[in-house]
Amino acid sequence: MTPFSRITGTGSFLPPRRVTNDDLARDLAQRGIETSDQWIIERTGIRARHFADPEVTSSDLGLEAAKRALEAAGRSAGDVDLIIVATSTPDMVFPSSAAILQNKLGIAGCPAFDVQAVCSGFVYALTVADAMIRTGSAKCALVVGAEVFSRILDFNDRTTCVLFGDGAGAVVLEASAEPGILASDLHADGKHVGILCVPGHVSGGQVLGTPLLHMDGQAVFKLAVRVLEEAARTCLQKAGKVDTEIDWLIPHQANIRIMEGTARKLKLPLDKLVVTVNEHGNTSAASIPLALDEAVRGGKVKKGDMLMLEGVGGGFTWGAVLLNM
Ligand code: UT7
């Protein structure tokens, strides 16, 4: 049995339609809702986001990201023996978007399932894949974060609809003799369900409750800043590492103020923080693998670098993964 798992390839995909803050402000103004590029940038750091066309699903976006990750890893779909998709906007109620993605990749037989941990979904999925590889259940896992959050946005609510976007990111995680994933730390606290949720559900052929995103932004903000530092510190402790050894911090991309606050708490200079929220908005479970792939392809993250990935979101869920590339 190989004792470790390691990322051998990354990939990502954004739907082509880029919507700037000004574009969105113009659309909202037609509904009598006021917002501005200035407010959105100052409060969040977001300048633009991508929205998928109505017929495009999470598994469609995930497929493109997965193909790019496989190519980067020098693997083909036939090598994959585990698929985990982190998503809160699955193609269907069931089956999982992972099973749908498996079929789109033209393979069959390997386990495929979704992980639902909202914006922490990717760090949850990566941790599960790492555990399955280390116990010998898989050798070559495809771990995907894919979202079409535009589907669940309430465009009459300016406090949330300006924040989110669509996209997908993927990694190939393989069994390795060299340490890749060094430590992870996952948490949930269900008493905070109400501060970030989509309360609608299917019953008797109808959607009951509101199938649109609701968020108490300030409550989420306060919790996020606290738990992100704790999870990162626990990971460092588990791996016997210190904060100054981190080469890149790749947090969930929700708000530049939260991300910079976390970097400061970890005493990291801001040039070690990978930022894509400006161009992607908050893509929930897709945001970390999207940012990772951009940092790899942009030449920032190099083989051997130590990365801290951190997610936080609905549930309330949070977690971190410390790894060597
Ligand atoms: O992905 C999961 C994790 N999610 C997060 O991490 C999100 C965490 N929360 C946040 O990022 C921030 O709380 C927000 C960006 C959502 C909001 O920023 P804020 O600084 O907490 O603003 P606020 O909610 O205190 O609102 C300030 C003002 C309010 O007006 P009044 O009451 O001061 O007159 C809002 O009504 O800004 C108003 N406002 C807006 N104005 C223009 C709220 N949304 C908008 C808008 N455009 N889009």
Image (cartoon, rainbow, N blue to C red):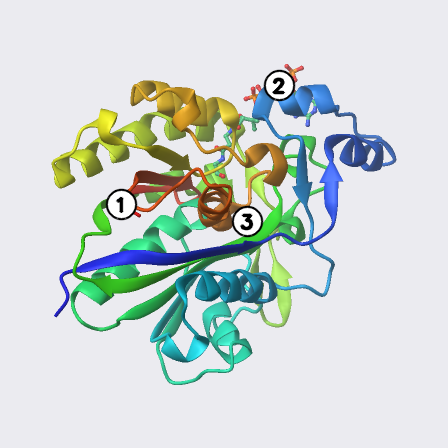
Ligand 1 quadrant assignment: top right
Disc 1 crowd, CA 10 A, few/some/many (<14, 14-19, 20+): many
Disc 3 crowd, CA 10 A, few/some/many (<14, 14-19, 20+): some
Identity, as a three-letter code, of the amino acid under mark 2: Glu
Asked if one can make out residue 51 in the rendered structure from this viewpoint, the answer is yes
Q: Secondary structure at mark 2?
A: helix
* Residue at 66 percent of width and 49 percent of height: 150
Whole-number angstrom distance, CA of label 1 to CA of label 2: 32 Å
Q: Quadrant of the N terminus?
A: bottom left
Horizontal side of 270 relative to 256 (left or right) equals left
222 is higher (above) or lower (below) than 162? above
Q: Secondary structure at mark 1?
A: strand
Of the two numbered discs 1 and 2 on the same chain, state the one appearing first in sequence: 2
Asked if one can make out residue 114 in the rendered structure from this viewpoint, the answer is no
Asked whether 183 or 203 is in front, the reply is: 183
Query: Where is residue 289 shown, x and y percent of the image?
Result: 45, 49
Q: Secondary structure at mark 3?
A: loop
Disc 2 crowd, CA 10 A, few/some/many (<14, 14-19, 20+): few
Query: Where is residue 77 shown, x and y percent of the image?
Result: 44, 76
Whole-number angstrom distance, CA of label 1 to CA of label 3: 32 Å
Of the two numbered discs 1 and 3 on the same chain, state the one appearing first in sequence: 3
Residue contact between numbered discs 2 and 3, judged by CB atoms under 8 Å: no
Of the two numbered discs 2 and 3 on the same chain, state the one appearing first in sequence: 2
* Residue at 41 percent of width and 67 percent of height: 74
Labels 1, 3: front one = 1
User: Can you tell which quarter of the image residue 248 is in?
Assistant: top left
Horizontal side of 221 relative to 139 (left or right) equals right
On whether ligand 1 comes within 8 Å of the CB at mark 1, the answer is no
The residue indicated by pointer 2 is 42
Q: Which mark is residue 198?
A: 3
The residue indicated by pointer 1 is 323
User: Can you tell which quarter of the image residue 111 is in?
Assistant: bottom left
